[in-house]
Image (cartoon, rainbow, N blue to C red):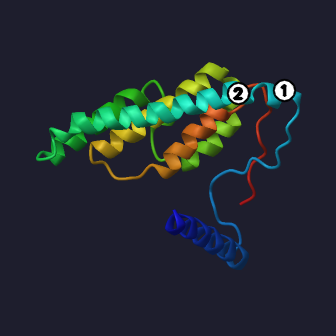
Amino acid sequence: LAVYLLAVFGALGAFLLLSKVHGSGLSMPSFGTASAGTREYLFAVPAAAVALAGAYVFFLSGKALKGAFSRLEDKPALSAALGGLGLAAVSLFVPYAMFSGEAESTELMNAYPAFSGGALIAVGMVKIVMTNLCIRSGLRGGHFFPVIFGGIAIGADSTATPMPAAPS
């Protein structure tokens, strides 16, 4: 626990130092300041339940896909091809499932008022499963930005106005 805490604080310190020296160069969008009122407090428990469901989807899909692709460990090309086909098939219906989610976060932030709350939750859940599919099938990438994107989609307020574009 101590080592993990030191790593987190070290990474945060390095990030803050580099941001001061070089300016903020992250391409992730900024949501600006947040304020909590009665509406936000009323939705805290249901929102936490959906977040917990997302965590379970992430865990269970990772476990299931690990088991499915473990049979193909000696066939990496076939494994990656199946992962790519799965991703391509799903992206026909959920284009936001493609790529890491870093650039798509800005696109989603500008488009989310056009989605229902249920559709946004579905997009986030699909992204979480597709992340595990890609990683378990041997495709390149990691969990970090895709899971952030899934959280943005799941937590987006479909009744809010789009966020202004982040300064370049």
Callout 1 amino acid? Arg
Q: Secondary structure at mark 1?
A: helix
Residue at the spot x=50%, y=51% of the render? Answer: 144
Residue at the spot x=35%, y=33% of the render? Answer: 88
Residue at the spot x=45%, y=30% of the render? Answer: 57
Give the Cα distance between marks 2 and 1. 12 Å
- Position of the C terminus, as image quadrant, is bottom right
**Taking the image as drawn, is residue 124 in sight?**
no
Write down the residue under mark 1: 39
Say which of 146 and 49 sits in front. 49
Of callouts 2 and 1, the N-terminal one? 1
**Taking the image as drawn, is residue 50 in sight?**
yes
Say which of 118 and 27 sits in front. 118
- The crowd level at tag 1 (other Cα within 10 Å; few <14, some 14-19, many 20+) is few
Residue placed furthest toward the bottom = 21
Residue placed furthest toward the left = 74
Callout 2 amino acid? Val
Q: Please provide percent x and percent y for residue 1.
A: 51, 62
Q: Please provide percent x and percent y for residue 49.
A: 62, 27
Write down the residue under mark 2: 45
Residue placed furthest toward the right = 37
- The crowd level at tag 2 (other Cα within 10 Å; few <14, some 14-19, many 20+) is few
Can you say whether 12 is above or below 136 in the image?
A: below
